Image (cartoon, rainbow, N blue to C red):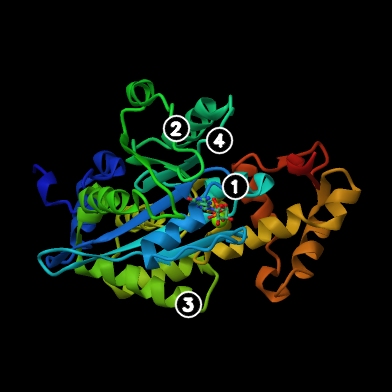
Amino acid sequence: NTIYIGANPIENPPVELLTQNKESINEYYDSMQEDTTTLNEAKIIFVGDGSVGKTSLMKRLINNSFNIEEEQTDGIDIQSYDIFLKCGSKINASIWDFGGQQILQATHQLFLSKRSIYVLVIEDRKNDLHKDHDIDKWLTQINSLGGNPSILIVKNKTDENPNSDIQKNKLQNKFKNIDSFHEISCKTNKGVKKLKSALDNAIINLPMRKIELPINWINVKNDLKLKSDKDDLLYLNTYDDICTKHDIKSNIAKTTLLHLLHDLGSVIAFEELSSHNTAILNPHWITEGIYALIRSNTLIINNGIITIKQAQKALDSYVDHLRFTKKAQYILDAMITFNLCHRTSNNDEFLIPILL
Ligand code: GDP
Ligand code: MG
């Protein structure tokens, strides 16, 4: 009657499994085809304040270019960063770079996941009394996700200020998951090569990319990837259908796979939003929806208060309006999950305090 945990492709078998009867446990294992393959995917997240050089670093890493007039990133930019292993296989990594505007930074919490690699970019300005506190703030936020992901700390613009007084030992004692410190200049390319090899190593050693998955689970992931080219959203009954098509019938297996896909960034599926039966395939959809509300005139005129109806109107008048039909409540609920929005005593009104 013992379950052979070692056979489970997920490094930690889902806790839900422990409370199940024998049938459900069998159903879970039946939903995994015997052939497995290494996941070989990785999500790298660049964090840091605006204009420290995150986008410049991404460009250095991807095509070794530099633009002294780099424009501010709006929303999220996701670029692929593939790594070829000696054995011939490839890791599909992607770098997530976020826009820096202060008011929008809170939105990016939606995309931080505990099984990623983090690159914290800082700029060591002269006479900046707050910088230690800044590093601390970012590291604390990353570690609040749990999972102790690897973090590379990168001080950029050393061409302007070569002196460094970052208290490495102190930080390392407090945050054990710091992988390494780097001092670079995206302008002169100094230190970038060393940083790249540390990053590549972190990707190769990332536990998530080494996961062995049954072929049919990988096939679900691939189907969703295709679907994301044309659809912004994934309704959970559609997800069920895709799982069924690939012989995944166990509910625990479906949930486990959905969590994994969420950690990978393939879908955005928060537990808190499960009553909507809707997950997100296109990360730009949710950022644009949130920006549309934050930037709406109604909100500015009404001191941060917006009704569902006004929210829907703001969404509908944004770029491609059909994309947000009847989604005001969903977007507001997503914002509530991250404290970007609060319910008021009037059920129909919401407070978005971000501009206040
Ligand atoms: P982000 O907001 O963090 O993405 O920062 P950007 O990559 O857009 O860079 C902000 C500005 O700093 C741009 O004008 C860049 O050209 C400039 N910049 C980036 N890296 C360096 C560097 O190493 N040295 C200098 N002098 N300027 C840099
Ligand atoms: Mg940028």
Q: Are the two marked residues, 3 and 1, in contact with CB atoms closer than 8 angstroms?
A: no
Residue drawn at 47 percent across, 30 percent down: 140
Q: CA distance from mark 4 to mark 1?
A: 13 Å
Q: Nearer the viewer, mark 2 or mark 3?
A: 2
Q: CA distance from mark 2 to mark 3?
A: 46 Å
Amino acid at pointer 4: Arg
Amino acid at pointer 3: Asp
Circle number at residue 229: 3
Going from N to C along the chain, the mark reached first, 2 or 3, is: 2
Amino acid at pointer 1: Gly
Amino acid at pointer 2: Asn
Across and down, in percent, residue 15 comes to 29, 40
Going from N to C along the chain, the mark reached first, 4 or 1, is: 1
Q: Nearer the viewer, mark 3 or mark 1?
A: 1
Position of the N terminus, as image quadrant, is: top left
Going from N to C along the chain, the mark reached first, 2 or 1, is: 1
Counting other residues with Cα less than 10 Å from the Cα at mark 3, is it few (<14), some (14-19), or many (20 or more)?
A: few
The image quarter containing residue 70 is bottom right
Across and down, in percent, residue 120 comes to 44, 42
Residue 352 appears left or right of 289: right
Q: Are the two marked residues, 2 and 3, in contact with CB atoms closer than 8 angstroms?
A: no
Residue drawn at 50 percent across, 57 percent down: 55
* Residue under pointer 2: 163
Q: Nearer the viewer, mark 4 or mark 2?
A: 2
* Residue under pointer 1: 50
Q: Are the two marked residues, 4 and 1, in contact with CB atoms closer than 8 angstroms?
A: no
Ligand 1 neighbours mark 1 (CB distance < 8 Å): yes
* Residue under pointer 4: 125
Ligand 1 neighbours mark 2 (CB distance < 8 Å): no
Across and down, in percent, residue 133 comes to 53, 26
